[in-house]
Structures are given as C-alpha cells and as structure tokens.
Amino acid sequence: MNSNLHAKIIENENCFELIIAYNEIFLNMIKNIKEKKWIPDKKIWRFKKDNEIIRIIISYLKSLNYQIHFIRYNEQNNEKNNIQNLKELHAKLISRNFSTRTINQYLYYNSDFLRFIKKEPVNIKSQDIHNYLAYLLNTLKMTSSTVNVAYSALKFYYGQIIDSEIFEFIKRPKKPKTLPQILTQNEVKKILEINNNLKHKSILTLTYSSGLRVSEVVKLKFADLDFEKGTIFIRQSKGRKDRLTIFSKKAQLILSQYIKEYRPTYWLFEGWSSKTHLSIRSAQKIFENSVKKANIKKEVSIHSLRHSFATHLLENGVDIRYIQELLGHSSVRTTEIYTHLSKSKLFNITSPFDNI
C-alpha cells in the first residue's frame, strides 16, 4: 500500500467530512454523488450522513490505495468542551472585525487541532503544535499556504486567548518559492473566445480584464459596475478593504450584452436562484472546462487570469504601484513577484557591449 496517500473522514452528527489532498481521479469518481459540497474555507468535502454514500467513498479511496483515518463523532475528544473552549476565540475574532472566511478557518483549525491532540488547550505543549503541523503537511499533504493558515489560527488562539508563549520557538512553515503560472495574451484570448455561453464568457472576461480574485468576481453586485467612469467597485475583499479597479471598454461591451440577456437584479452572476451569487467552485469549473476546450496544457487555475492581468500590465509599461492599487495588495512587495514573471522586455535589453 502507498503510505503517502492519506484521507481523513470525520463523522459528525449531521454529515460526513472528508479531508483529502487534490486528486483528479478521485474527483472524477465522486462527481456523480449529488449530496456533496466543497467547503473552500476549510478545504474539505462535506457529504450527507448516509451509510451508502460513505461506503462508496471508502471503496473509492481503497481502490486508490489511500490510508483512511476515520474519526466518529462520539470518539472525538470532548467535542462539546472544545466548542465551549473556542467560544472566547469566536468572540475575539468578531470584536477584531475579522472576515467571516478567516473566522471560519480559525475556528476550524483550532477545533481540528484539539481533536487531533486530545488535550485541553491549557495543557498544550509546543511539540503538540509541531506534530499537528507535520501531520497536515506530511500525512494529509496539505499545501504550505493551507498549513500557514492553520499556523496563524493556532498562534492567534494560544497567544491572544490562552496567553501562552508556546509559539515563541515555533517557526512558520516556509512557503516554497515558486512563481505562478502565467498565460500569454494569445492563450487568454483562446480561453475567452472558446466560450459560447455568454455568462461564462462574461465571468472569465471580468476576472482577467479587471484582475479580480475568483471570490471577488462571484460576489459582484450589479450596482458595482460603473459604465460611465469605467470602474468596478470591489467590496470588503481580502483584508476587509474596498477598492476600485478598471472596467475595460471591451469588457463593457460583453457585459452589456450579458445584462441585456440575463437581466441580473442584485448579484451580477446569480447562482441557482436570484437570491444567491454563483459559487466559487462553479467559476473554477467554468475556467477548467474552457482551458480544456482551448487545448492549453499549462497547469493553471482561474487565479492565473489575475496573475496574467498583472504581468501583462507590467509588460506594457504600467508602473508597479498602479498595479498594486488595482490588485488591492497592501504592500508593493507582494506585487513585485510579477517583475520576475515579466520577461518580454528583459530579453529586449541591449547589452552595453553591443554599443562599444
């Protein structure tokens, strides 16, 4: 058995939760299970509490040689006590005006940590933290970005609530220094033009042409578009900040056509009803299908459109501080990654030797 493949199934009172690293074969296996939901904040799958569904999932995992860690509700370490312990954390996060997404993440990882370590918060040692972070990284194969969220969640709780110094000698897991994958302008054009569905085309067009995060594009309201000024208002995005970004003239033409045909009232891109916005996963799937249709072989995600927007602006000579404002980065250091990606002008520089 391949011991590198691990999955954790948690049986709660009303549902099953599955923690598993990304596996395209497994995703194809479960696509016909209707009663499931991807929870992006927690990076978990949630399934209806049905013995037949869980039997199918376990059989799929076993066929792929996964080691399955199964935790039943009544085996979890004083779950009610854990919830009580985290009430103070919840209140503190709300009083500090943290986003709903961050609150959910911090509560989840602290609760999961207590289940894992089977101790009361006041009895936690630094080695317990090390063991949990190693478990997330090495056993569950979570990305370094996800493990960093868990680190921040635990550090906040044990530093701010428990007033413990256990994090004094625990270093944040290092992120690998990888550059994001960038699409060329021709590749972006192919992805957009391959779409016959006007709604799908509009979603991807706005994501690229305005440099939006997927969470921003799905939560756009009809009123956020200003055709006259050529701007889009982004509300309470990452870091709880509002910002304005550009609304391109070509994008305006496509969006005008979309609005005329779909007649959105509140949410620009409605979900299953006019009362809900499109889900993040739906937007990601639209992009993935478009990339496949366009026959692009790069390992890209919908976030690559935002990376490509920034890189193409830089290549066109736009000042990096303007790009920082458009992207909503707090620090220009975050934006500077695109200077490593923008190569077209770099290789056009004339060597001083040629002028001798």
Image (spheres, helix red, strand yellow):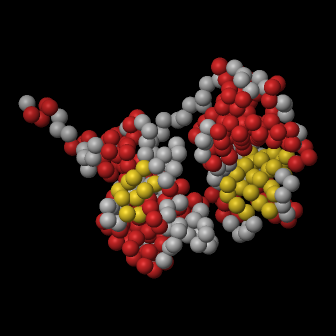
Q: In x, y percent, where is residue 263?
A: 48, 77
Please name whichever residue, 216 or 293, is drawn nearer the observer in this view of the structure: 216
Examine the rendered structure and indicate whether residue 256 appears above or below residue 96: below
Query: Is 122 on the left or on the right of 190, as rendered?
Result: right
Image quadrant in which you'd find residue 261: bottom left
Q: Nearer the viewer, residue 20 or 268?
A: 268
Against 186, is 134 above or below? above
- Say whether residue 335 is visible: yes
Residue furthest front as drawn:
95
Give the quadrant of residue 160: top right
In the image: residue 170, left or right of residue 85: left
Q: Position of residue 235 (x, y in %)?
A: 49, 53
Position of 52 with respect to 235 (left or right) is right
Which quadrant would the C terminus be assigned to in this image? top left
Residue at horizontal 86 percent and vertical 54 percent from the top: 13
Return the residue found at the far right.
74
Spot the residue most to the bottom. Answer: 261
Q: Is residue 263 left or right of residue 61?
A: left
Please identify the quarter of the rendering in which residue 273 is found: bottom right
Q: Residue at x 48, y 46 (%)?
A: 241
Residue 186 visible: no
Q: Residue furthest left?
A: 356
Residue at the spot 77% in from the left edge and 23% down from the top edge: 125
Vertical side of 280 occupied by 8: above or below: above
Q: How many marks?
A: 0
Counting from the top left corner in percent of width and height, residue 216 is at 50, 56
**Residue for point 80% across, 62% down:** 48
